Structure formats: C-alpha cells, structure tokens
Image: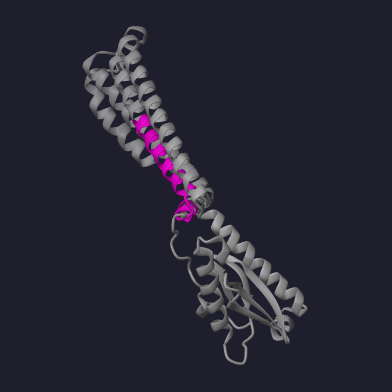
Amino acid sequence: SDPSPPPSPTASPADQSQDQGFPVILDQKTLFTIQVPTATMSPRQRAQIATDEINRIARDDSDVNHKVVAEPQQNIVVIAQSRPNGGRRFILAVTSDDAQAAQRSLEDLAQEWHVAIQDGIQEYRTTYSLKRFIFAAVATGIATLVLIVVIWLINRLATLIHHYLGLQWESRTQPLQFQNLVILTARAQRILLQKLISLLRWFLVIFTVFNYGLLVTFFFPQTKDISSNILNFFYIQIIAVLQAGVDFLPNLFIIIAAMLVASFFLRASKLIFDALEAGRIAWPGFYPDWAQPTHNLVTILIVAVT
C-alpha cells in the first residue's frame, strides 16, 4: 500500500462568484469550474460533491476502484466511478446548461471534464505513490551525504587557511604604517583575516544547510509547497529591497561616502596629531605643543563639512 498523503484541500466556493464558477479541486489544482445549477443543486454544491468524490477516489490505492467512466443519458452525461460489482458511484452530471454556459457541445464538455478527472487522479496517484516516496527518501539520503561532505570541506578549507596564516603571514607581511607610525601590525592583520575567514565559514555553512532544507522539502509532495513558498517569499523580498535600493541609491552613495570620508579623516588626523605630539613624526615648522589644539580645530572642521 502506498503512503497515505494528507487529504487534499477542497473547494472554497465562498471565494468564487457565479460568473467565475466554482472550482473542482484535486491536490490544490483546479480541474474545471462549474457555473450553473441543476434542478436540485447549486453550482457550489455540485462542485463540492465532485471535489469530495474525486479526492476520495484519488486517495484509494486500489487500481480497480479508481476507474472513472462517462455515460450519456437523456440530455446529460453522467461521470461516475465504476465499481467491481458493475455498479456506479455518482461523481458529476454534465448538463446541457453546462455546455451552453461554456459555449461548447455537451459531448465535448463532458469529454473534457472526464479527461480532466482521469488525468488529475493519475497525476495525484503518481505523485503520492510508493515509488515517489522511495525516490524522495533516497534523494534525501544522497543530499544529506553531500551536505556532510560540503560542510566538512568548508571547515577543512577554513582550518587550512587559519593554519597558513598562523605560520606564514607574520613572517612574510610588513606592518601597515605611516612614516614611523604603525597603523596595523602584521599580527593584527593576521587576526583580522582569521576573523573574516571564520565569518565566511559560518555564512557558507548556514547557506548550505538552508538550501539543503529547501531541497529536501521539494523532494516530498507533502512539503514541496513549503520550498516554493519560501523561495517566492525571498524572491519578492529581494525584488522589493533591490527596487528600494535602486530608488535610494543616489542618496545612499552620498551618505556612505560622507561617513567613510569623515571617519577616515577623523582617524587619520588623530593618529597624525598624536604622533606629532609624541614626536614620532616631525613636520617642519610645527611644534608638538600645537598638536592637540590643531587636532581639535581639524575635528570641528571635518564634522562641520560632513
């Protein structure tokens, strides 16, 4: 017996107008719509009964019980489930009013609905079959192995880079300095690079696990809509952010440029004037006692310009 899938959602006729018709739904897919009533049922009731019967048949794992037949009768075509004992279980009656509303002949419309029901049931049973479940389980196992290997490679590569930086960087790298003032030592450069590598490693691990989760939910019919909804959500959000970013780009560039330039000049001025005051660097005609007052004036000027 195939794994039992969750019950498919039924029609939501309250959301439909008379002109649009009421949908007959199987596994969130609309097979066709019913627009007109019969003498005893509204189009909503007809669509609900057909939806319930088709979903019941689709979830029946017995091949003999899901055969659907279309039988012409006086002014209607009855679509029903064929029983092993020769009986019939009613699904839907296609009437001349249905044909008139669809602007089709009765025979053509009945054939279209009949084929839609048969194809929908077959597609549903294939989707939720044991074969599909086994495929999804095997694919999940393979994806899990790939996930483990990828995470191991990311961690291994990060470890090798950390090891290289620890052994080689300080001996092969010069400090970043201005005249005799050391701005960033080789050791500080190594620590900064190692922290950046660690952040990149965690980002890659989280990104890999996130995509693994999406892929696994896509394998199983019961959860495939989750991955689609998440991807659609991120797609919509990314598009919105990009659009807002494009609209704000001119102002953003000005703000970022002003902040970066101001920050650079503030830091640079502090380093330079501190060094001038301490005598680590010399400026012809400039006395160390002038360093702090001049630095204060330059700071006020930079902030005002910013």
Q: Residue furthest right?
A: 105
Indicate the position of residue 250 as horizontal and vertical percent values: 52, 46
Indicate the position of residue 25 as horizontal and vertical percent values: 55, 69
Indicate the position of residue 11 as horizontal and vertical percent values: 52, 74
Q: Nearer the viewer, residue 226 or 161?
A: 226
Horizontal relation, residue 38 to residue 206: left or right: right
Q: Nearer the viewer, residue 47 or 201?
A: 47
Q: Quadrant of residue 103?
A: bottom right
Q: Is residue 21 magenta?
A: no
Indicate the position of residue 236 as horizontal and vertical percent values: 51, 54
Indicate whether 300 appears above or below 237: above
Q: Which residues are magenta?
A: 199-228
Residue drawn at x 30%, y 14% is 166
Residue drawn at x 26%, y 18% is 275
- On the question of residue 62 being in view, the answer is yes
Q: Nearer the viewer, residue 236 or 273?
A: 236
